[in-house]
Amino acid sequence: MSKNHDGAVYSKASKAARFLLFVFMTFIALLTLYPILYVVLGAFKENGELLAGGTNIFPKKWILDNFINAWQQADFATYTLNSIYLALGVMLLSLLSSSMAGYVFSRKKFRGKELLYGLFVAFMFINVGSITLRPLFELAIKLKMNTSLASVIFISAGGGQATYIFLVRGYMNTIPKELDEAAKIDGCTFFQTFYKIILPVLKPILATIALLSFRGGWNEYILPLVFTMTNAAKRPLTVGVTMLKNAGDGAAAWNIMFAGATISIVPILLIYIFTSKYFIAGLTAGAVKG
């Protein structure tokens, strides 16, 4: 077979592979976006159309009043503030704890470090979910924190620690240890080296963790639902929006709930749109070394 013929065969195979990859990625994108599009477009439908089902994703008649009704029937201003408080609290706690733990696991030598880190990594693949909900709630009752979002913040911040520590440690392993040695020569302690030298260098990976933890706090549902059962004023958007389902006369008002859900996802979508490049850069950098 000639060289030119080999090149032509390779070129055709490469084009076929790229086409198959494009088709596959398009399918994954549609699979990911369909639930969001269904909710957003459903927010413009009449409730009867949603209850009737059907395969038509676009509304037969576009109803803008659904958003007005959703805003008026739910205390969206209070729910939004609660969601911001919850998401920011989870984000700040996650950043503080994971950055320090990742730094210690990367730079400090102590007995049992690899075993402890191995346990953290193992828990990345374990989701205990509702199994721990009852004991956590009972503990919150004993601490008289069962009607506060503070408990939800502490519990939610601990949920993603294994992943965040893994990312920080991986990023720390790409930073030359000469920086630590130079700081030590200048008289910095272990902790001073962290917040004066290392912390500014960790900005890319910390931006990624900030986005992940903020999203986790914003989307949290089960914990806020349980902890705010007796205190409606503390409900975040995820819990408040579900209450809109009972806004109809007899039948579930899915159109009102979809409108409320659409309003609630707008802030997090905007955050991702404007910060996606930092998210991808930090996530890729943190996964270089484990």
Image (cartoon, rainbow, N blue to C red):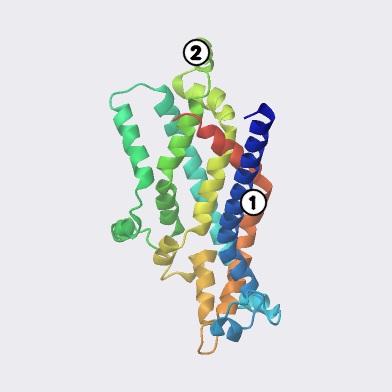
Residue 51 in which image quadrant: bottom right
- Residue at (65, 41) in percent of width and height: 12
| 42 versus 95 height, above or below | below
At label 2, counting other C-alpha atoms closer than 10 Å, the crowd grade (few under 14, some 14-19, many 20 or more) is few
| 178 versus 48 height, above or below | above
Q: CA distance from mark 2 to mark 1?
A: 38 Å
- Residue at (33, 34) in percent of width and height: 118
Tell me, for residue 271, which label it has, or none.
1
Quadrant, the C terminus: top left
Q: In the rendered view, does 128 fall on the left or right side of 20?
A: left
Quadrant, the N terminus: top right
- Which label lies toward us, 2 or 1? 1
- Residue at (69, 30) in percent of width and height: 4
Name the element at disc 2.
helix
Q: In the rendered view, does 1 fall on the left or right side of 235?
A: right
Q: Taking the image as drawn, is residue 257 in sight?
A: yes
The x and y percentages for residue 254 are: 55, 78
Q: What residue does disc 2 label?
A: 181
Under mark 2, the amino acid is Glu
Task: Looking at the image, tell me whether mark 2 or mark 1 is earlier in sequence order.
Answer: 2
| 93 versus 250 height, above or below | above
Q: In the rendered view, does 34 fall on the left or right side of 133?
A: right
